[in-house]
Amino acid sequence: MNPVPFLLFKTAKKRMLQQSTLKFLTNLKKNNNKNWFEAHRDLYEEAKQDFAFMVDDIIKAIAGFDEPIGLLKPKECTFRINRDVRFSADKRPYKSNMAAAFSRGGKKAIIAGYYFHCEPGQNFVAGGFYNPMPQELAKIRQEIDYGFDEWQKIIGAKKFRTHFSEGVQGTGTLVRPPKGYEEDNPAISFLKMKGFIVKQQFTDTDLLDKDAVKKIAAAFEAMKPMIDFLNRAVE
């Protein structure tokens, strides 16, 4: 692996999220309407830029252990703050968070990857495969079934358990075993899952700390073996 991206990150000036960004998101949650947003657009642009700086640093940090991520630009990872309200009963126009996803191909790639969610009082990092399509889900289940010893080793590793004490969480679970599997299969609790996610909470204070990016990257590095396993299954 080319170590240059990680070395650049280590020698770069440390940047943490600014308090003003969290304050903007807090106020937006209380005033989630177009008139307020437009009246405070300058504050939004400042918060957006601050978050982009942090996302850029996270990209550089991830590149130290997952080199292809280093090719991404912040705009390829960051989600829009506007909500899609076309098919939702909730017509609030804006999200009360800023978020970014990191995977080969950017946020729209249909593969496993890393996720950072910034929302006052509800910050977290997560990763895995959130909502695989039936074809990808079948491949993941097969890989877990065939390679269950490897899967157990990955999710049982000390570093993994330190960051993700709740283990792998499904984004939905079948009541009965999926077709082709029996209830007594040793991996059945995972085979019933419709998605495969791990998650670690971060406080507002964590994100305002000078080592915030380092801590976020440490969580992502701990989940990387699981990310690799899931992507190997679908690719």
Image (tube, rainbow, N blue to C red):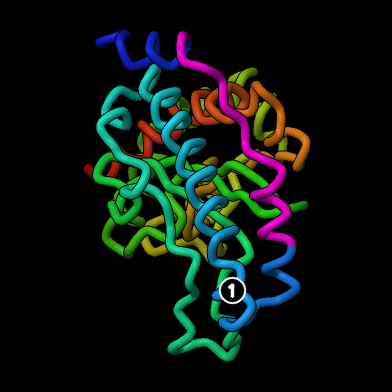
| Residue 156 seen in the current view | no
Residue located 27% across and 60% down the image: 135
Q: Position of residue 59 (x, y in %)?
A: 40, 31
Residue located 56% across and 43% down the image: 126
* Depicted 91 relative to depicted 161: above or below: below
- Label 1 amino acid? Phe
Q: Position of residue 4 (x, y in %)?
A: 30, 10
The quarter in which the N terminus is drawn is: top left
- Please indicate whether residue 203 sits to the left or right of residue 146 in the image: right
Q: Give the extent of the magenta segment.
A: 11-26
Q: Examine the structure image and report whether residue 18 is included in the region drawn in magenta.
A: yes
- Please indicate whether residue 114 sits to the left or right of residue 211 in the image: left
Q: Examine the structure image and report whether residue 171 is included in the region drawn in magenta.
A: no
Q: Nearer the viewer, residue 52 or 134?
A: 52
* Depicted 70 relative to depicted 43: above or below: above
Q: Position of residue 178 (x, y in %)?
A: 44, 62
The quarter in which the C terminus is drawn is: top left
Q: Nearer the viewer, residue 154 or 118?
A: 118
**Residue on which disc 1 sits:** 37
Q: Position of residue 2 (x, y in %)?
A: 25, 10
- Please indicate whether residue 84 sits to the left or right of residue 63 in the image: right
| Residue 101 seen in the current view | yes
Q: Nearer the viewer, residue 209 or 225?
A: 209
Quadrant in the rendering for residue 201: top right
Q: How many marks?
A: 1
* Depicted 137 relative to depicted 55: above or below: below
Query: How many C-alpha atoms fall within 10 Å of the one at disc 1: few (<14), some, or many (≥20)?
Result: some
- Please indicate whether residue 100 sits to the left or right of residue 90 in the image: left
Residue located 54% across and 41% down the image: 186
Residue located 55% across and 55% down the image: 98
Dot 1 falls on a residue whose secondary structure is helix
